Image (cartoon, rainbow, N blue to C red):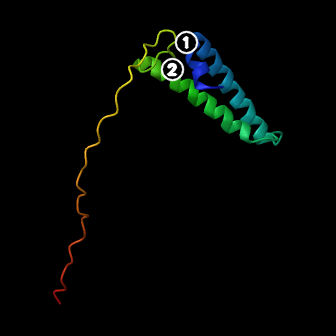
């Protein structure tokens, strides 16, 4: 499950996926406790999926990135001319001040 795919889904669909992922995590943990789980890396994969879903939901709450913009709606970016590089003088490196022994 990729984040771009999740961002295209509606909020109720994300809720359904969240419930399914949490249920799957519960079942994997139960199988692990009983000793029936063969591939324990599935637990971390499901946990990452849950984190991705939660991230998309929080982004929407804050209005950070509600959805992936369609390629048609993007405005073309004007090409900029490369700026002339200014030469900067190198700053001398700082060194520690030597402390004198006062013994």
Pinpoint residue 78: horizontal percent, then vertical percent: 38, 19
Quick check: 73 above or below 92?
above
Are discs 1 and 2 less than 8 Å apart at CB?
A: yes
Residues 93 and 35: in front is 93
Quick check: 39 above or below 77?
below
Residue 11, numbered circle = 1
Pinpoint residue 61: horizontal percent, then vertical percent: 43, 18
Pinpoint residue 90: horizontal percent, then vertical percent: 25, 57
Quadrant hosting residue 99: bottom left
Pinpoint residue 13: horizontal percent, then vertical percent: 61, 12
Q: Is 86 displayed left or right of 36 in the figure? A: left
Q: Residue at x 41, y 17 (%)?
A: 63
Q: Residues within 10 Å of mark 2 (few under 14, many from 20)?
A: many
Quick check: 49 above or below 40?
above
**Is disc 2 placed on a helix, strand or loop?**
helix
Q: Residue at x 65, y 19 (%)?
A: 17
Q: Is 10 displayed left or right of 62 in the figure? A: right
* Mark 1 or 2, nearer chain start: 1
Q: In 3D space, how far apart are the residues under numbered discs 1 and 2 (Cα atoms)? A: 8 Å
Q: Quadrant of the N terminus?
A: top right
Q: Is 14 displayed left or right of 101 in the figure? A: right
Residues 14 and 30: in front is 14
**Is disc 1 placed on a helix, strand or loop?**
helix
Residues 64 and 18: in front is 64
Q: Is 82 displayed left or right of 86 in the figure? A: right
- Disc 2: which residue: 57
């Amino acid at each position: 499950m990729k984040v771009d795919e999740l961002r295209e889904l509606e909020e109720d669909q994300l809720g359904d996926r969240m419930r399914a992922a949490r249920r799957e995590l519960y079942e994997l943990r139960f199988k692990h406790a009983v000793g029936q789980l063969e591939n324990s890396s599935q637990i971390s994969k499901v946990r990452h999926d849950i984190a991705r879903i939660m991230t998309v939901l929080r982004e929407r709450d804050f209005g950070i990135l509600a959805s992936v913009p369609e390629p048609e709606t993007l405005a073309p970016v004007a090409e900029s001319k490369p700026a002339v590089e200014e030469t900067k003088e190198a700053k001398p490196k700082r060194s520690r001040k030597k402390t004198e022994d006062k013994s």
